[in-house]
Image: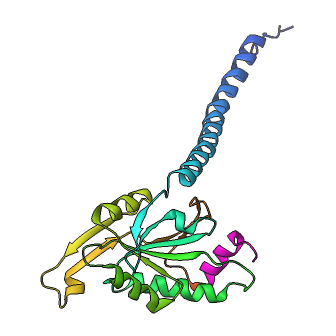
C-alpha cells in the first residue's frame, strides 16, 4: 500500500507573518489618508484663523471734504470696503453699481453696512474726485483717499495687490495709465474685524444674498 506523502502547509508563524504584512500594506495608505485629512483640517483651521485676524486693520485716510477719517468714525457700524480708482474703465464702476443695486434688494428691516470706496491712485484721486465718483453710484458710498503712504498702509492691511501699467500708445489718459488690482468686497463688523469676503464680480442678487446673514435687524 502506497504511503501518502505529507505536504507541509504554511506554518502558524508564516500565516501570522503574511497577515502582518497585509496589515502593513493596508496600514500605510490608510495612515497617509488620515494624515492628509487631518492636515487638511488643520490647514483650513489655520487659514480660517489667519483669514479672520490678519486681513484688515486700523487706517487713517481723508474723505471728500478733506477731513481725516479713521475706522473709529464707523465704530458700531458694519462697513463694506472696496479698493479701486476713479479712472478705472471697467471693474470699478461695475462693482460700485453692483453694490448700489444690491442694497436696494436687501430687506428694509436690515441695517446696511456703510459702503466705502478707497482709491489706490492717491496721486490723481483728490478728495473731491473720490467723493464725486462715489456719489455717481449712490449717495451712501463714502469715497476715501489719502497720502501715498496712507493708501499703501491700508492696502497692505487688507492684502490688496496693485500694479501700475503705462501704455504711451493708449488713445487717452485713462487707457495709458492703468492700475491692475485685486477686486473683492470686504465686509467688516462694527469693530472693524473681517466678517466675509465677497467676489466683486457677483451679481447684485448674489451680493445681497451673501450679505443678508450678517446684517442685524433695525
Q: Is residue 215 magenta?
A: yes
Residue displayed at 40% across by 67% down: 61
User: Can residue 83 be seen from the camera position used here?
Assistant: yes
Residue displayed at 68% across by 69% down: 214
> What quarter of the picture does the N terminus occupy?
top right
Residue 98 placement, left or right of 182:
right
Q: Is residue 133 magenta?
A: no
The spot of residue 40 in percent (x, y) is: 59, 45
Residue 152 placement, left or right of 77:
left
Q: Main secondary structure of the magenta part?
A: helix
- Which residue in the rendered view is the most extreme toward the left? 168
Q: How is the protein colored in the picture?
A: rainbow
User: Can residue 197 be seen from the camera position used here?
Assistant: no
The spot of residue 186 in percent (x, y) is: 53, 68
Determine whether 7 is above or below 78 in the image: above
- Residue nearest the observer in this picture, 147 or 158: 147
The spot of residue 122 in percent (x, y) is: 29, 72
Part of the protein shown in magenta:
205-218
Q: Quadrant of residue 107?
A: bottom right
Residue 108 placement, left or right of 88:
right
Determine whether 157 is above or below 125 in the image: above
- Residue nearest the observer in this picture, 46 or 126: 126
Count of numbered badges drawn on the protein: 0
The spot of residue 152 in percent (x, y) is: 33, 61
Residue displayed at 51% across by 88% down: 139
Residue 64 placement, left or right of 53:
left
- Residue nearest the observer in this picture, 216 or 201: 216
Q: Quadrant of residue 160?
A: bottom left
> What quarter of the picture does the C terminus occupy?
bottom right
Amino acid at each position: 500500500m502506497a504511503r501518502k506523502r505529507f505536504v507541509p502547509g504554511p506554518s502558524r508563524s508564516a500565516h501570522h507573518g503574511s497577515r502582518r504584512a497585509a496589515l502593513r500594506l493596508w496600514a500605510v495608505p490608510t495612515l497617509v489618508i488620515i494624515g492628509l485629512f487631518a492636515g487638511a483640517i488643520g490647514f483650513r483651521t489655520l487659514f480660517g484663523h489667519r483669514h479672520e485676524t490678519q486681513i484688515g486693520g486700523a487706517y487713517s485716510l481723508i474723505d471728500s471734504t478733506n477731513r481725516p477719517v479713521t475706522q473709529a468714525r464707523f465704530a458700531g457700524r458694519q462697513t463694506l470696503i472696496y479698493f479701486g480708482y476713479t479712472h478705472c474703465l471697467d471693474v470699478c464702476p461695475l462693482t460700485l453699481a453692483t453694490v448700489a443695486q444690491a442694497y436696494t434688494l436687501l430687506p428694509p428691516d436690515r441695517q446696511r453696512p456703510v459702503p466705502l470706496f478707497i482709491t489706490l491712485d492717491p496721486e490723481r484721486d483728490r478728495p473731491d474726485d473720490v467723493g464725486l465718483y462715489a456719489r455717481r453710484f449712490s449717495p451712501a458710498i463714502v469715497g476715501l483717499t489719502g497720502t501715498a503712504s496712507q493708501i499703501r498702509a491700508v492696502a497692505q492691511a487688507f492684502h490688496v495687490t496693485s500694479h501700475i501699467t503705462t501704455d504711451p500708445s493708449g488713445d487717452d489718459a485713462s487707457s495709458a495709465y492703468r492700475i491692475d488690482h485685486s477686486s473683492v468686497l470686504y465686509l467688516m463688523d462694527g469693530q472693524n474685524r473681517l466678517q466675509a469676503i465677497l467676489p466683486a464680480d457677483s451679481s447684485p442678487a448674489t451680493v445681497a444674498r451673501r450679505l443678508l446673514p450678517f446684517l442685524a435687524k433695525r
